[in-house]
Amino acid sequence: MTMSSVTVRVDSETKAQASAIAEELGTDLSAATRMFYKQMIREQGIPVNLRLRDIPNAETVKAITEGRDMLSSDQGGHTTADELFDSLGI
């Protein structure tokens, strides 16, 4: 297969940030660009769900906070599944 070159102009900060993310994922910008093109072809569109990590929504953050608060208070937790089910009335 014949290879072609692509030149993309971006500001230095954008390139540095993208490069750092690619490196953290174990790749480089050239490979990341090839992956992006392949994903476009596979999905027949522009992929938008390429993330290093998921950011929890407000509901999830609230649940995490409530759980941590419960663990640090006198409410504590359950030592067995039966205790948990009993507290839930199951």
Image (cartoon, rainbow, N blue to C red):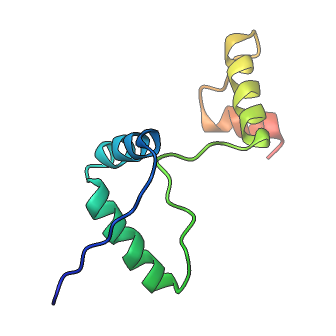
Viewer-side residue, 43 vs 16 = 16
Residue 62 occupies quadrant: top right
Residue farthest left in this picture: 1
| As drawn, 29 above or below 79 | below
Viewer-side residue, 79 vs 5 = 5
On the rendered structure, is 19 left or right of 40? Answer: left
Q: Provide residue 35's location: percent of width, then percent of height.
A: 35, 69
On the rendered structure, is 76 left or right of 35? Answer: right
Q: Which residue sits at x=68%, y=21%?
A: 68
- Classify the position of the N terminus by image quarter: bottom left
Q: Which residue sits at x=39%, y=75%?
A: 37
Residue 20 occupies quadrant: top left
Residue farthest right in this picture: 89
Q: How many marks?
A: 0
Q: Which residue sits at x=42%, y=40%?
A: 17
Q: Which residue sits at x=23%, y=80%?
A: 4
Q: Provide residue 22's location: percent of width, then percent of height.
A: 34, 49
Q: Provide residue 8's location: percent of width, then percent of height.
A: 39, 62
Q: Provide residue 38's location: percent of width, then percent of height.
A: 37, 78
Viewer-side residue, 42 vs 83 = 42
Viewer-side residue, 70 vs 60 = 60
